[in-house]
Amino acid sequence: MSHEHVSNTKRIWFVFGLLSAVTTVEVILGIIKPGSLEFTHFLGLNLLNWIFYILTIFKAYYIVWAFMHMEGEKSSLRWSVVSPVIFLVLYLLFILLTEGHYIYGVFKDSTIKWNF
């Protein structure tokens, strides 16, 4: 009953390179802020914010997939871990958009000034 140790150096460097590339794209988009993405709105947010959300979720998923070794687990275990996270992210995004719109309306239509 001996288990052979397999080196994952190539895989680790691939994951490092992929996550670094996605982070670099995020940083470049954050610095440049292309007008075509910043001033085009979709479902209450500009496209640049949607790109940031999507890339961040991709990175989080890939970190769980690669570094927490979820690719080797059974499908039922993967879904039991991923399903609550998906639900919570969507719920928090709903709260963020709903409350953000409410606060914007309060400050826009009242005598209260933006002090932050």
Image (cartoon, rainbow, N blue to C red):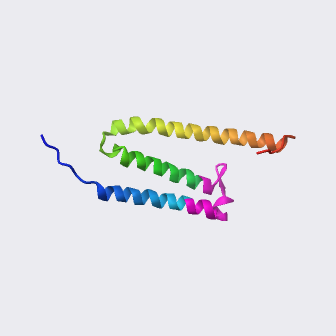
Q: Which residue is drawn at 37% across and 47% down?
A: 67
Query: Where on the picture, by quarter, is residue 26?
Result: bottom right
Where the N terminus falls, by quadrant?
top left
Q: Which residue is drawn at 65% across and 42% down?
A: 97
Along the line of sight, the residue nearer the viewer: 25 or 82: 25
Q: Where is residue 91 in the image (x, y as percent from the top left)?
A: 57, 37
Seen as rendered, the residue at the extreme left is 1
Query: Where on the picture, by quarter, is residue 90?
Result: top right
Seen as rendered, the residue at the extreme right is 111
Q: Does the magenta stretch include residue 39?
A: yes
Query: Where on the picture, by quarter, is residue 68?
Result: top left
Q: How many labels were placed on the picture? A: 0
Q: Residue at x 66, y 59 (%)?
A: 38
Q: Residue at x 59, y 61 (%)?
A: 29
Note whether 19 is above or below 104 in the view shown. Answer: below
Q: Position of residue 54 (x, y in %)?
A: 53, 52
Where the C terminus falls, by quadrant?
top right
Q: What stretch is highlighted in magenta?
A: 27-49
Q: Does the magenta stretch include residue 97?
A: no
